[in-house]
Image (cartoon, rainbow, N blue to C red):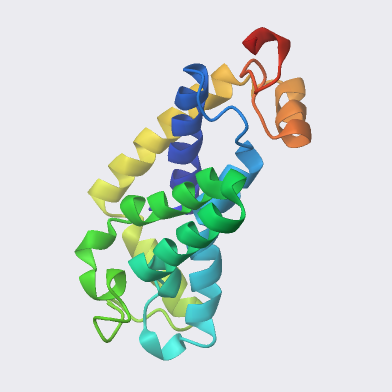
């Protein structure tokens, strides 16, 4: 999944949950960061320390790292647990079950690599190829539609809606725990 898709699906799920009275304290800005975190760590690693692995889905795309991160957060920073779960959902969005060696690394012995991505040019070429696949285009189109729904619901088509999101981390009209409209 492309970066915008990760954010779109995360924000749509969060908007839906908040409209039903759940996850009211989750910050959309932090949720976007959590949705991208495995890529924000693994992409630079694949261009530097792990360039020989040939993949851009490295250690943060493994069950071990996601599990340890989630356990650590639930133990030491429980209020961050929604963000850990959002990071976990990145593995679902990237369909990591199709890459079992990466998913079960280090127990599998190596990371899956469908195409070398150890240089910026190779990574851009791979993403250009991915972006032409009909299945990816369909998933990303649904993501854009979901993002449109979130934007409309949060009034992000107005300057004040965007300012509210950037200032508070939540959408206009989505109640947060402690707001008068929630009580």
- 121 vs 91: above or below: below
Residue visible at 61% across and 53% down? 77
Q: Position of residue 1 (x, y in %)?
A: 38, 53
Task: Give whichever of 27, 160 is nearer the camera.
Answer: 27
Report the residue at 24% width, 76% height from top. 101
Residue displayed at 47% across by 39% down: 10
Q: Residue furthest front?
A: 75
Answer whether residue 5 is visible to the viewer in this image.
yes
In the image shown, does 113 or 107 lie closer to the viewer? 107
Relative side of 114 to 32, left or right:
left
Q: Quadrant of residue 44?
A: bottom right
Numbered circles on residues, count:
0
Q: Position of residue 176 (x, y in %)?
A: 65, 23
Residue 112 to residue 160: above or below: below
Residue 32 appears anywhere in the view: no
Q: Could you say where residue 12 lies in the image, as x and y percent from the top left?
A: 46, 31
């Amino acid at each position: 999944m492309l970066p915008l898709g990760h954010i779109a699906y995360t924000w749509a799920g969060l908007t839906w949950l908040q409209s039903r009275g759940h996850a009211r304290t989750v910050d959309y800005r932090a949720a976007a960061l959590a949705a991208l975190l495995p890529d924000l760590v693994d992409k630079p690693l694949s261009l530097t320390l792990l360039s020989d692995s040939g993949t851009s889905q490295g250690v943060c795309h493994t069950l071990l790292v996601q599990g340890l991160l989630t356990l650590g957060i639930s133990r030491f920073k429980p209020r961050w647990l929604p963000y850990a779960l959002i990071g976990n959902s990145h593995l679902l969005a990237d369909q990591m079950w199709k890459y079992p060696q990466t998913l079960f690394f280090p127990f599998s012995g190596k990371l899956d690599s469908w195409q070398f991505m150890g240089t910026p040019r190779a990574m851009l070429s791979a993403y250009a190829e991915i972006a032409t696949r009909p299945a990816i285009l369909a998933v990303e189109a649904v993501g854009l539609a979901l993002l449109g729904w979130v934007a409309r619901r949060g009034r992000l088509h107005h300057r004040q809606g965007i300012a509210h999101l950037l200032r508070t981390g939540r959408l206009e009209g989505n109640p947060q725990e402690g707001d008068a409209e929630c009580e």
